[in-house]
Image: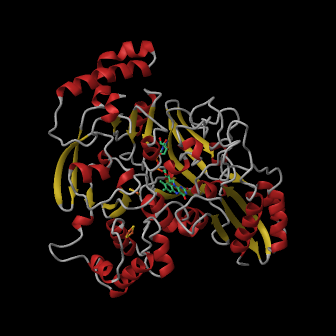
Amino acid sequence: MAQENLNPTAPADDHDEARRTFLKQTSVLTALALTPGPVVQAAAAQWDEKVAAAFEKVPLKLDINGKKYRLQVEPRTTLLDLLREQLHLTGTKKGCDYGQCGACTVHVDGQRVNSCLTLAVMQDGRKVTTIEGLAEGDKLHPMQEAFIKHDGFQCGYCTPGQIMSAVACIREGHANSEGEIREYMSGNICRCGAYPNIVAAIQEVKNGGQKV
Amino acid sequence: MNQFQYVRPTKQKAAIEALARDANAQFIAGGTNLLDLMKRGVMQPQKLVDINRLPLNKIERMDGGIRIGALALNSAVAEDQLVQQQLPLLAQALNAGASAQLRNMATVGGNMLQRTRCHYFYDTALPCNKREPGSGCGALEGINRMHAIFGFSDKCIAVHPSDMSVALAALDATVLVSGPKGERRIAFLDFHRLPGDTPQKDTNLEQGELVVAVEVPENAFPKNVHYLKVRERASYAFALVSVAAALQLDGNTIKAARLAMGGVAHKPWRLTEAEAALVGKPATEETFRQAAAVAMQGAKAFKHNAYKLKLAPNSIVQALKNAAGLA
Ligand SMILES: Cc1cc2nc3c(=O)[nH]c(=O)nc-3n(C[C@H](O)[C@H](O)[C@H](O)COP(=O)(O)OP(=O)(O)OC[C@H]3O[C@@H](n4cnc5c(N)ncnc54)[C@H](O)[C@@H]3O)c2cc1C
Ligand code: FES
Ligand code: FES
């Protein structure tokens, strides 16, 4: 359908009335096509509005890296696309977009998740931390320092996800041995194969006993 | 991804009603399977009913067992003390699945309802009776390395990908569901189904029914359990074959046993006859080999998955050895 091609993450103030009207009309047709005749007729008035709402933007409140946002998003926008395309927080990477690489790892209410496989609207009211929110001003997070010291990357594409995951791995208490670190970091793929250095960085932070 | 209506009810009744109104609506929990499939156009729901605000995430002791809410996260269940003490097999199976990030998102209900990873199902350019009834099964004569060796039909040879479900099948769990017609309980072994002529139906859940919880009865398997998962890399991959094994030992004699396999059929494959072959016998490799032979009766391979005919019995033996502490 035509709306497939529209940018799902256009900025909140990008109103396009013609498009809305078009979408409302299409959605009425969709509703009619999907629901058995008599039911549609009975519920028509109220039903149309509901389905039309599907194609509108939905209000969303988020705390991202300590900053409060009030946003409008299309329901189908993933948290990853919201961060990157709408808020321009491009530190979080899109590797696969299917949960298979971990490049998009962020923390939601302190827990690491793949931001590509969750809808932004599902996170309403939550606290999100991205790689941009890890340092304190100019002072890097100990995990960032350790990745630099141990050469925990080559191209760097997987690195934000690796670091977010590594911090969580220690906080969860799953960094007690090399084997455990490898298992609990397996959701982060590194095509450059920096794994031994990543493990070394995590072990140093863990053994250093710094607060992560 | 197609556009859809989004609703986020806070009451169970409202969630069920929101789904019942529309044949093309889906619940969304963690979203880790549904959104993946929606991005690929494999599933195109017109309405998503977000159930994350329903109070269904408790893990609690109940009369005669443990009750796990459908929205309990896979990571929360795997880390739960009660589960670790009384259902270590379930904790092991959960930790063998996906990645730490995905387990922080995936729910118990979503895990058991995840769809197959068959490539023909995933690729909308290829035929698949599960995705598009009547289009044919591409895997039957195609590339079928990952496919079933038990319980398949000429309409579908896909396997169920869940690790957690293999443990729940072994542990005689029950699924609690609630729908437009009220509540009912489904034995875990009857929850998933074989493909037959209608592979588009993975389970016996009816349209509009919500999984509310899973109950696992008290059991005699707080130790001597092992979940063995054989995959193409050490972690973060689906099983080629997996085995959930639980033994109750009296000295060296097997008093009771539970066995189920994953990666071999359209549903978690419980091995009751092999269990019977273990009871009363000494816990030795010889006993385990005999039980594995019983388990493999009726297995049949396709062009590319004949390796499973060896891998499966060997995995059963290894899982039982690990469970018995013989490894
Ligand atoms: C890269 C990758 C690797 C993976 N590896 C593994 C693995 O090794 N082993 C493994 O077992 N799994 C693996 N998975 C799958 C993962 O476990 C599932 O995606 C997850 O468990 C689904 O749970 P969810 O809550 O995210 O479900 P969702 O995606 O939200 O839902 C899945 C389906 O269940 C339905 N549903 C959800 N909750 C309910 C409910 N309460 N009542 C009725 N219907 C409901 C939804 O409508 C949907 O159709 C992997 C996934 C990915 C992306
Ligand atoms: S982009 Fe999310 S896991 Fe690859
Ligand atoms: S540093 Fe290049 S992918 Fe990891």
Can residue B307 be seen here?
Answer: yes
Can residue A125 be seen here?
Answer: no
Tell me if residue B131 comes above or below residue B144 in the rendering.
above
In the rendered image, the quadrant that contains the C terminus of chain B is bottom right
In the rendered image, the quadrant that contains the N terminus of chain B is top left
Tell me if residue B243 comes above or below residue A41 in the rendering.
below
Name the spot of residue A181 as percent of width and height, x first: 45, 76
Q: Identify the residue shown where x is 48% and y is 74%.
A: A182
Depth check: give the residue in front, A9 or A121.
A9
Q: Identify the residue shown where x is 34% and y is 41%.
A: B10
Depth check: give the residue in front, B117 or B140.
B140
Based on the displayed image, in which of its 4 quarters is residue B253 positioned? bottom right
Q: Identify the residue shown where x is 72% and y is 65%.
A: B315
Q: Identify the residue shown where x is 42% and y is 31%.
A: B17
Name the spot of residue B161 as percent of width and height, x first: 59, 52
Q: Single out the residue that lies furthest toward the bottom.
A: A208
Depth check: give the residue in front, B249 or A75.
A75
- Which colour style is shown? secondary structure
Name the spot of residue B117 as percent of width and height, x first: 57, 49
Residue B269 in the figure: left or right of residue A208: right
Depth check: give the residue in front, B157 or B119.
B119
Residue B165 in the figure: left or right of residue B18: right
Name the spot of residue B106 as percent of width and height, x first: 46, 54
Tell me if residue A58 comes above or below residue B256 in the rendering.
above
Tell me if residue B236 comes above or below residue B210 in the rendering.
below
Q: How many marks?
A: 0
Based on the displayed image, in which of its 4 quarters is residue B248 positioned? bottom right
